[in-house]
Image (cartoon, grey):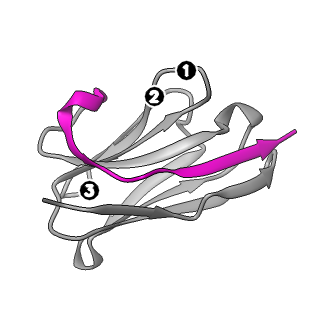
Amino acid sequence: QVQLVESGGGLMQAGGSLRLSCVASGRTYVMGWFRQAPGKQREWVARITTIGSTNYADSVKGRFTISRDNAKNTVYLQMNSLKPEDTAVYYCAAGRVAGATPALYDYWGQGTQVTVSS
């Protein structure tokens, strides 16, 4: 059983930056970030494999960067040029198979709120 704890969310003006962190209680393989806005389905944002291979949703490509520190069991999401449509609860997830489908991920954090004002 792996526990994931996110931090770093908050309120930011459009154009600003935030960095989310997710600390895992044990070794993880594929790590992903998802987000869910009110009334919408959970949306995949980015994922990173153990060796650092990354992939991004088109909506965040060029603005967000996912990275990881395996020694610290931590994954990060650097979010730049934030837009109001980035407002959502952001979730960290861990799994064994890389992909964009929530069902591929076995463990989930509790989520952290990101609010971007216009």
Would you say the residues marked 2 and 3 are in contact, meaning their CB atoms lie under 8 Å apart? no
In the rendered image, the vertical position of residue 101 relative to residue 1, given as above or below: above
The image position of residue 71, as x and y in percent, is 23, 79
* SS at mark 3 in the image: loop
Residue closest to the eye, 43 or 39: 39
Name the kind of residue labelled 3 in the image: Gly
Q: Residue at x 70, y 30 (%)?
A: 85
Q: How far from the left and from the top, in percent, is residue 28? A: 17, 60
**Circle number at residue 43:** 2
Question: What distance separates the C-alpha of mark 2 from that of mark 1?
Answer: 8 Å
Q: Are marks 2 and 1 in contact (CB under 8 Å)?
A: yes
User: What mark, if any, has residue 65 been given in the picture?
Assistant: none
Asked if labels 3 and 1 touch by Cβ distance under 8 angstroms, the answer is no
Q: Earlier in the sequence, mark 1 or mark 3?
A: 1
Q: Is 72 on the left or on the right of 106, as rendered?
A: right
Report the span colored magenta: 100-118
What is the number of the mark on residue 40? Answer: 1
